[in-house]
Image (cartoon, grey):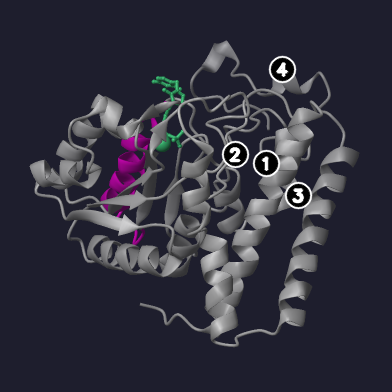
């Protein structure tokens, strides 16, 4: 695995803090009704993305996830200003403002969404991996899904094919304890989701996903296996979300004490503590990172605020024209 160094820790701190603050800003502008529709935030789960990016080959590997999808494309290289503009519905957004919160997408950066149908991305992730295998391209697809999505039939259908065909894919359940307001324990007798892989003879296991090092180690092994042609892996990344399922969630299904317990092992705090303990940065240098992050969030907000809404004509440019359907691409 690529060595985890002082530079890695400083990058993790800056990246994770930026993702957290970027989404805190989204929560704020959502309340001001500048961002409409649903808004599902990733606060608390950042160590997963940080660990994954450390071991992916960003020049060729792919990622696909559900609707909690604002920061992953940023990690993959998408301009965060364009992500925020997309949430504002502006024409400078990643999908010209037509996708919104749940549908961030960038083919250029190999980020394949952004999917609102729970479990819908599981077969799609396997499909991306199938295409790479079929066309003999050296790439691995990371397919993320929630603990709720793990209960969808599509997982089983996909696993059957993925192991049979040795597809270069890693299935990562982000077990944040809840599917909307329903805890894992309420939906299944077995709460160790990773064990679903055993039934398919798929390498599988649990991961402490509040710690980016642990995520990186587990994913490195899984990605290497996929790259060597040895097929898929199924990991259960044990994490937690601090905010509600979406912005309209009264959170009556959990206690404030429970949230506080997880905040004690917050991934950003853990990384910051290691930076301090090892003297990777002085307090002054940490403050400089905090300021850089704050400034970049403000820049994203300003960009989104000042961008224009799409012209009405755009509505007609993003639909297929029936005549030559499905071969005629839309105009954007
Ligand atoms: C097929 C389908 N059924 C139901 C829903 C409504 N729904 C949206 S999110 C969600 C819970 C999913 O939870 P989980 O997979 O754990 O992901 P998390 O939100 O915790 O990241 C449900 C039931 C949906 N979007 N799609
Ligand atoms: Mg969940």
Between disc 3 and disc 4, the foreground one is 3
Residue receiving disc 1: 94
Residue receiving disc 3: 81
Question: Who is closer to the viewer here, 10 or 62?
Answer: 10
Q: Position of residue 146 (x, y in %)?
A: 38, 38
In this view, the residue farthest toward the right is 306
Q: Quadrant of the C terminus?
A: top right
Task: Characterize the local packing of mark 1: few (<14), some (14-19) or many (20 or more) Cα atoms within 10 angstroms.
Answer: many
Of the numbered discs 3 and 2, the one sitting upstream in the chain is 3
Residue receiving disc 2: 104
Based on the picture, tell me whether residue 130 belongs to the magenta stretch: yes
Of the numbered discs 4 and 2, the one sitting upstream in the chain is 2
Q: Position of residue 244 (x, y in %)?
A: 55, 33
Of the numbered discs 1 and 3, the one sitting upstream in the chain is 3
User: In the image, what residue occupies the spot 54% across and 43% down?
Assistant: 242
> Which residues are drawn in magenta?
118-139
Question: Who is closer to the viewer here, 229 or 263?
Answer: 263
Task: Characterize the local packing of mark 4: few (<14), some (14-19) or many (20 or more) Cα atoms within 10 angstroms.
Answer: few
Q: Secondary structure at mark 1?
A: loop
């Amino acid at each position: 695995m690529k060595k985890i160094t002082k530079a890695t820790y400083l990058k993790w701190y800056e990246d994770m803090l930026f993702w957290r603050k970027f989404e805190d800003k989204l929560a704020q502008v959502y309340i001001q009704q500048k961002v409409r529709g649903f808004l599902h935030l990733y606060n608390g789960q950042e160590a997963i993305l940080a660990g994954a990016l450390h071991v992916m080959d960003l020049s060729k590997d792919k990622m696909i996830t559900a609707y909690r999808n604002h920061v992953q494309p940023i990690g993959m290289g998408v301009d965060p200003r364009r992500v925020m503009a997309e949430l504002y519905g502006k024409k400078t957004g990643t999908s010209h403002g037509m996708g919104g919160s749940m549908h961030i997408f960038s083919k250029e950066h190999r980020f394949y969404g952004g999917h609102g149908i729970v479990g819908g991305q599981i077969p799609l992730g396997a499909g991306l991996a199938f295409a790479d295998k079929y066309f003999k391209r050296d790439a691995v697809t990371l397919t993320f899904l929630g603990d709720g999505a793990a209960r969808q039939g599509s997982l089983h259908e996909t696993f059957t094919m993925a192991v049979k065909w040795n597809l270069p894919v890693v299935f990562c359940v982000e077990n944040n304890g809840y599917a909307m307001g329903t805890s894992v324990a309420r939906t299944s007798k077995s709460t160790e989701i990773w064990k679903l892989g055993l039934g398919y003879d798929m390498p599988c296991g649990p991961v402490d996903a509040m710690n980016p090092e642990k995520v990186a180690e587990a994913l490195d092994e899984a990605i290497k296996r996929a790259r060597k042609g040895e097929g898929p892996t199924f990991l259960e990344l044990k994490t937690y979300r601090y905010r509600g399922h979406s912005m309209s969630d009264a959170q009556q299904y959990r206690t404030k004490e429970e949230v506080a317990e997880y905040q004690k092992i917050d991934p950003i705090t853990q990384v910051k503590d290691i930076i301090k303990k090892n003297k990777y940065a002085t307090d002054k240098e940490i403050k400089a990172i905090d300021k850089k992050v704050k400034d970049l969030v403000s820049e994203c907000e300003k960009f989104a605020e000042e961008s224009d809404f799409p012209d009405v004509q755009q509505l007609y440019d993003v639909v297929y024209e029936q005549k030559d359907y499905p071969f005629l691409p839309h105009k954007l």
